[in-house]
Amino acid sequence: MAVADNRITFWFGCNMLRHAEMIRLSIMLLERAGYDVSAAGGPSYCCGTTFDNQLHAASTMAARTVASFNAAAESEGRGTVVTWCPSCHMHMSDIMAPGNAAAFDITHITELLADNVDRLAPLLQVPVKRRVLLHRHAGFAATHVPVNDRVAALLGRIAGLELAEGPAVPAHMCSSLVPVPGALAAAAEATWAAARAAKCDTVCTIFHSCHRELSALEGRDGLQVRNWVQLVAEAMGVEASDAYRGWRNGGAPDIAAIERADPEKYKRLIEPELRRPPPLPPVARG
Amino acid sequence: MTQLPPARADTTEAFLAEAGPRLADLCTACGACFKACPMVDHLGLRGSDAEAATAGLRLLATGAAAPAETVKWVAACAKSGLCVSACPERAAGLDAMLLVRIARQRAINDTKQVSIKPDPALFPRVKIFARLQLTDEELGKWL
């Protein structure tokens, strides 16, 4: 791989900031696959997809983000932007680029790592004895990147890991089901029913918003919830902690972290999300 | 690798204004996208007239008001993408999901048939999540 080809921008989006460990693991996997990674995300790199009610503001955000990536391509040779978030990826290809001249191409992280699986495979030395149901969505995979197949290809290289077939539930990821009454619960139930039927012990999420929603179901029917980067890291012998999953299941951040973040804002903005009901009601006990 | 398309406009706002009528012109209101959409079941619209619903889609994409069924449908788009492959005009350049997306935007901003509640805490919330977990170096380099 030529040096000019291995310099990438990893665009992790806004809402991945709930999952700092997953950002770090993603960077680690990209680096171990041979890439020089510059990570970018948060509001300064917003795609604008959530601002359909403020089209001018969304347009300004899109222009700013494309300009930043153009600058990285021109000044640092980072001509490839690697996405994580399917909303960002779709918005870039369908709306941002047609409205802003882009000096870069995009690829999804699962696509890039699957293309480089032979570089990663020798690092997957630790057997991961899990029977895994991959939580798949129909959207994005059908229209932009065959992400379900790419993740399956990566997990398929992990010794000891058995992958079970499951349904491809509607939407591009779970967050877009939240506003539709009953849709998120139906998707979660379909996933859990398939996992139970296949006698799995783990449900594997692909995207952050699915992980955000489903991690509240950790332990239900004996199923653990893990993201694909966590499983790959586990096979590398790398610790894959998950603060958000712990917080969503009754834990809380360290008091020093809350003090640093701002206690008032933590209580007002974060706690309601962490304490909201899970997408499925509690299992009735006889 | 996704090779990005060349720019068709100077801003995304201008692109969306141009794309709505253009995609609406390609649409024949055959109803295939509506029938393929899994959200139709969740919304209780499965028995509705699919052709009428997609005729409304064309109206919305040009900024004109649409029937209630169309509005309810486009407002609930979850980006399943099943409409894209179901559309018989795909080869002609019709991206059905983008058409639905633009129709939804028009229903919010032009015809005012969809009301969405902006979340002013969206960015503040992710910034607090970042400060809970990222090091100063990560905050400085990534955001």
Image (cartoon, coloured by chain):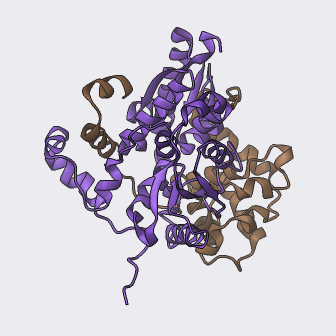
Q: Using the image as rendered, state which of residue A19 and residue B48 is in the foreground.
A: A19
Q: Using the image as rendered, state which of residue A266 and residue A252 is in the foreground.
A: A252
Relative placement, left or right, of B9 versus A176 is right
Residue B4 in the image: x percent, y percent?
68, 29
| Chain letter corresponding to the colour brown | B
Relative placement, left or right, of A189 versus B81 is left
Residue B124 in the image: x percent, y percent?
29, 43
Residue A100 in the image: x percent, y percent?
60, 26
State which quarter of the image contains the C terminus of chain B: top left
Query: In the rendered image of this protein, does residue B103 appear above or below residue A78?
Result: below
State which quarter of the image contains the N terminus of chain B: top right
Query: In the rendered image of this protein, does residue A225 appear above or below residue A264?
Result: below
Residue B104 in the image: x percent, y percent?
58, 55
Q: Is residue B14 visible?
A: no
Q: Using the image as rendered, state which of residue A146 and residue A251 is in the foreground.
A: A251
Q: Is residue B13 visible?
A: yes
| Residue at 63% in and 15% down | A5
Query: Which colour is chain A painted?
Result: purple
Q: Using the image as rendered, state which of residue A66 and residue A35 is in the foreground.
A: A35
Quarter of the rendering containing residue A97: top right
Query: In the rendered image of this protein, does residue B81 appear above or below residue B14?
Result: below
Relative placement, left or right, of A58 versus A162 is left
| Residue at 59% in and 44% down | A158
